[in-house]
Image (spheres, rainbow, N blue to C red):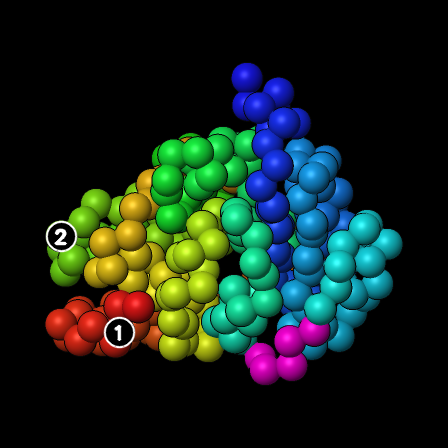
Amino acid sequence: DLKEWLSYMSKKIAIMIPCYNEEITIGKVVKKWKSRLPQADVYVYDNNSSDRTREVAKEAGAIVRSVSRKGKGNVVKRMFKDNDAECLIMVDGDNTYSETEAERMVYLITEKGYDMVVGDRLSTDYFKQNKKLSHSLGNVLVNSMIRILFKRKVKDTLSGCRAFSHDFAKEIDIDCTGFEVETEITIKAILGKWKFVFIPIKYYDREKGSKSKIDTYDDGIKILATILKMRINKGDRKSVV
């Protein structure tokens, strides 16, 4: 039983939530992940929100830190630099990811030796829940490109729910600044021969009033450009770790 195992597990866990203007959902995310992993420290990394994201996160019990440089890549880079936990869990603040696999993610990192565990939305109900056809097509295209160009089957490259080992978080170099970050991390895990796995995770569509920060076309082009650039440079060891 993973819950019983977790109650005796003494390794340090950190839940890290990159966030920008998510006052509607951030409190729920903090509370439900903290409830699932009560021994974990929960950090919200606020990227210059103009709403009440910071206040709501603090009220929910999170440790709030600010990242002034705009872009999710910059936020994730700071999160990795800050934290020394044995297991780091990253989850978006939009309340679209279920917390029910949290214990399994920690177990796979701390007991089974995985360096990254990715919550796979696409194998569950993403295509039913997600209302944007362009996002669904984008996910399929990105996965297909990586399978073809890097010869590795991936199930959900763009997932924002992941767990990382301490070594992976400290050794991986993040070059991008924006929403390409999940793609870059996934490809560097492939090129660096890190041990990683995808596990199915339940996905929920955004709540009413909660808006996606991704620009389908501009960010989509950046993601595709990142894949092509990393394929061209894959022989350069500096692009791996």
Residues drawn in magenta: 66-70
The Cα atoms of the two marked residues, 2 and 1, are separated by: 17 Å
Which residue does the image show at 66% across and 37% down from the upper left?
37
**Where is residue 104 shown, x and y percent of the image?**
49, 31
Q: Quadrant of the C terminus?
A: bottom left
Which residue does the image show at 56% across and 58% down from the upper left?
84
Instruction: Give left or right: position of 231 versus 32.
Output: left
For this orientation, the residue located farthest to the top is 1
Badge 1 density bin: few <14, some 14–19, many ≥20, Cα 10 Å: some
> Looking at the rendered structure, which numbered label has been put on residue 239?
1
**Where is residue 160 shown, x and y percent of the image?**
49, 53
Which residue does the image show at 75% across and 59% down from the upper left?
63
Q: Nearer the viewer, residue 220 or 154?
A: 154
- Tell me the amino acid under the disc marked 1: Ser
Vertical order, 6 against 170 (above or below): above
| Residue 216 visible from this viewpoint | no
| Residue 60 visible from this viewpoint | yes
Q: Quadrant of the N terminus?
A: top right
Q: Nearer the viewer, residue 208 or 106?
A: 106
Which residue does the image show at 25% across and 76% down from the upper left?
238
| Residue under label 2 | 151
Residue 68 lies within the magenta run: yes
Instruction: Give left or right: position of 97 versus 210.
Output: left
